[in-house]
Image: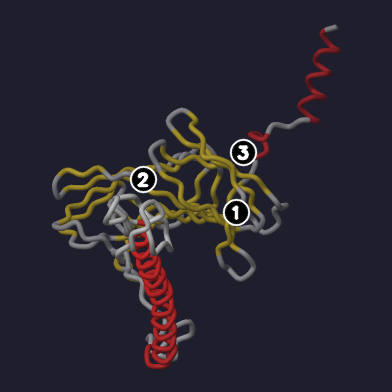
Amino acid sequence: MRKLFLLFSLGAVLIFPTSTLAQNSTTLQSVSVQLWPEYDQPSMLVLTDFSVPANTKLPLDLTFRIPKGANLIAVANYNANDALVDAVFVGPSLAGDWQEFTITMTSTSARFEYYDPISFNGNERAYSYLWAGDYAVKQFAIRVLEPLDVTMLSTDPQLPSISSAGEGKYYTTAAMQLAQGKEYALALQYSKTSNLLVVEQPNVQPATPLDENTQGRVSLAKALPYVLGILGMILVIAGIYFWRSSGQPVSKTRRRAAHNVAKTKEESVYCSQCGDRAKPGDRFCRTCGARLKS
């Protein structure tokens, strides 16, 4: 019975290998982490580019951990033209002190981005980054972008090289190899005399100058005859409406009032001799025969 149980367990492991074992056996070719403090938000923008060996069988699901308080904003694969394309991913979901998400890699290179809070104390800022070591990495490196108006910046461990490119000055580590389970921590501290961001939110500007010939834009000079024509038609229609609604009913009312007055006068004739009321059209009193006064 015991042998049967062991054989059943071994078969289950062989037939249904756990995703964790499959993922842990993956070795990443490279991981490049960029830390951009106060770039376009008063927080840390963390960009992680990673790749797997060229002979890796795709698609491949990989699970990564990010800090519990982080806000995952992008997960993408690099296509054949080295452009980022939104990737299929699941999560993030809480897992202890972390958040986990799983990306489906359809190419050998991918990226994920998230914002992570920075500790503020007046002009002093502090941030700690940690690579959790879920995968072995053949080439691991970190770059830190220097924020604006910095008076002091230090890292632990100290970053050995400084370079200038694109947005500004970078502090860069040398490429290193990390085994599975090997963590890498970097503590960053700096002083800043302002709250300026490296990239302010840009105002939306047209790609080309706007003029009368811009597609979708209507020129007032060209549209003026049409506007005047429409206004003229509105005035004519309004005049006809007010004439019909105000002129004719008044005439009918006046005719009706005059008719009622005449009728009232006819119906109000009385004999001056005997006082009897005469009927309409009578010229002599039907009672005493006296001539009726008109």
SS of the residue at dot 3?
helix
- Name the residue carrying label 1: 87
Q: How many marks?
A: 3
Please give left or right for residue 114 compared with residue 11 in the image: left
Marking on residue 24: 3
Q: Is residue 171 visible?
A: no
| Quarter occupied by the N terminus | top right
Front residue (pair 142, 245): 245
Above or below residue 251? Residue 32 is above
Label 3 neighbourhood size at 10 Å, few (<14), some (14-19), many (20+)? some
Residue 36 is drawn in which quadrant?
bottom left
Above or below residue 188? Residue 199 is below
Q: Residue at x 48, y 85 (%)?
A: 215
Rendering coords of residue 198 (x, y %) = 28, 63
Q: Is residue 22 visible?
A: yes
Please give left or right for residue 200 compared with residue 22 in the image: left
Of the residues shown, which amino acid type is indicated by label 2? Asp
| Quarter occupied by the C terminus | bottom left
SS of the residue at dot 2?
strand
Q: Residue at x 46, y 52 (%)?
A: 113
- Name the residue carrying label 2: 116
Front residue (pair 264, 163): 264
Label 1 neighbourhood size at 10 Å, few (<14), some (14-19), many (20+)? some
Front residue (pair 183, 210): 210
